[in-house]
Image (cartoon, rainbow, N blue to C red):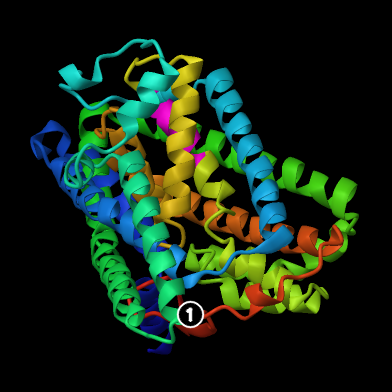
């Protein structure tokens, strides 16, 4: 009797197992019932709608939380930003090169009956940099949340966060603590939104079942070929980022033996593969960095303070996935538009770091901001449980690489970065894969 109970426990504890089972059952149901299933795939669209609704305010409070709770100063901060910027640029280059060269979107099956909306007319549109930048600025505090556009939300969040940060400094200088009320509200709102998103993410197996059943029922198993191409190209991109970009840093700059580096990463990578979250892996990552001899200041700067910057896994995935969706719908994008989408992906990946299924959630926001259809997104859910783990492992390697580079490049650790108001709490937050920083 012990083995069946153990299997049931594993099923309850493993979202990946539930999604995989839902994918198989949906395919079998679609093969058996065919077109008699009707519009059951709309269930997946409803789940995506909920995710998009919650993701936009989540980005706002995530950015505010960074401003209120992080201290980033000195040469270490500039070096960390420089390293993260180079890695992000190379991740975007890999994503655009693979997506444009291999064109995996050609193999994805477009939902039956789809027609382009007037707001998302296909074709390459001219890019006017100044006009486009001005058009991204919010004209009022409501429209960015109504339209789900990431850039105006981030602009509002940065301006508000900078003002709140200044207010906090003034309060501390004057020996007052009224800022704690605002800080508690922002943190509470962020945790509440994360909990709500956790509930929505728990519905993903239902959405995957419905979407897979309708896809197989209308298109047959040909849809699986497109998903395999999509999955293979994204995994190839993440592999190149880790195997080529990160290892080049190690060999030519940090001069760290690869065997030593990857040996120390076994535990963090195993944890990231299980939790599908780089922040949930944070305690294990810090222990591994300490075992490698990396200073506490460098470890905390990269893995804690700058964790929102080390999201190359999410960034590469989003930039590539958006182009693949555009290819599937026959909506060619020029280089300027592709770079704009890459910029949107950077903002989304910075603003939504550490949230369960962060890549999937921010992808919905980026697609909306780029005025591309969300119709294919439910179908992509069926393999996102695999990609989520690949993204998390890539981000963990980026965190560790950043800490090693800070240590090896001769910049002394910033003592104030190690003595910020955050203290690591290794207990997992109930209902979320995010590690608490309280």
Q: Using the image as rendered, state which of residue 100 and residue 183 is in the foreground.
A: 183
- The answer to whether residue 271 is above or below residue 82 is below
Q: Position of residue 119 (x, y in %)?
A: 20, 21
**Is residue 232 at least partly visible in the picture?**
yes
Query: Label 1: which residue?
Result: 173
Which residues are the magenta region? 317-326
Looking at the rendered structure, the secondary structure element under dot 1 is: helix
Q: What residue is shown at x 72% (from left), y 53% (from top)? A: 79
**Is residue 267 at least partly visible in the picture?**
no
Q: Position of residue 28 (x, y in %)?
A: 27, 45
Q: What residue is shown at x 42% (from left), y 37% (from top)? A: 344
Is residue 325 within the magenta segment? yes
Position of residue 267 in the picture relative to residue 375 (left or right): right
Q: In which quarter of the image is the N terminus?
A: bottom left
Residue at the front extreme of this rendering: 174
- Magenta residues, dominant SS class: helix
Q: Using the image as rendered, state which of residue 174 and residue 24 is in the foreground.
A: 174
Position of residue 291 in the picture relative to residue 29 (left or right): right
Q: What residue is shown at x 56% (from left), y 71% (from top)? A: 281
């Amino acid at each position: 009797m012990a083995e069946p109970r153990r299997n049931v426990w594993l099923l309850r504890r493993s979202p990946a197992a539930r999604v995989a089972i839902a994918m198989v059952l949906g395919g079998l149901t679609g093969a058996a019932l065919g077109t008699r299933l009707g519009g059951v795939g709309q269930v997946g669209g409803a789940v995506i709608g909920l995710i998009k609704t919650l993701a936009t305010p989540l980005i706002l409070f995530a950015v505010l939380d960074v401003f209120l709770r992080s201290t980033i100063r000195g040469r270490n901060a500039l070096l960390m930003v420089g390293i993260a910027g180079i890695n992000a640029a190379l991740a975007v280059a890999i994503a655009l090169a693979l997506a444009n060269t291999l064109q995996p979107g050609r193999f994805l099956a477009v939902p039956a009956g789809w027609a382009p909306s007037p707001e998302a007319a296909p074709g390459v549109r001219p890019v006017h940099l100044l006009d486009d930048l001005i058009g991204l600025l919010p004209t009022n505090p409501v429209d960015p949340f109504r339209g789900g556009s990431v850039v105006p939300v981030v602009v509002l969040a940065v301006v508000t966060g900078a003002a709140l940060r200044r207010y906090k400094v003034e309060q501390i200088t004057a020996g007052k603590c009224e800022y704690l009320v605002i800080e508690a509200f922002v943190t509470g709102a962020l945790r509440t939104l994360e909990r709500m998103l956790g509930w929505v993410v728990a519905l993903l197996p239902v959405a995957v079942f419905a979407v897979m059943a309708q896809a197989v029922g209308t298109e047959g198993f040909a849809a699986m070929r497109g998903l395999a191409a999509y999955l293979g190209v994204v995994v190839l991109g993440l592999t190149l980022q880790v195997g080529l970009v990160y290892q080049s840093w190690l060999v030519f700059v940090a001069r760290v033996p690869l065997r030593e580096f990857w040996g120390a990463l076994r535990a963090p990578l195993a944890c990231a593969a299980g939790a599908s979250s780089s922040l949930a892996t944070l305690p294990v990552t810090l222990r591994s960095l300490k075992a490698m001899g990396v200073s506490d200041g460098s470890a905390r700067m990269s893995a804690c303070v700058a964790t929102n910057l080390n999201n190359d896994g999410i960034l590469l995935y989003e930039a590539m996935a958006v182009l693949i969706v555009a290819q599937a719908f026959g909506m060619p994008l020029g280089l300027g538009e592709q770079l704009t989408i890459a910029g949107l992906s950077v903002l989304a990946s910075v603003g939504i770091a550490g949230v369960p299924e962060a890549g999937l959630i921010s992808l919905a926001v980026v697609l909306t901001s780029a005025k591309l259809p969300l119709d294919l997104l439910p179908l992509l859910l069926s393999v996102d449980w695999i990609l989520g783990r690949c993204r998390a492992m890539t981000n963990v390697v980026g965190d560790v690489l950043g800490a090693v580079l800070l240590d090896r490049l001769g910049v002394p650790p910033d003592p104030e970065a190690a003595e910020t108001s955050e203290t690591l709490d290794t207990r997992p937050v109930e209902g979320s894969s995010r590690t608490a920083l309280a």
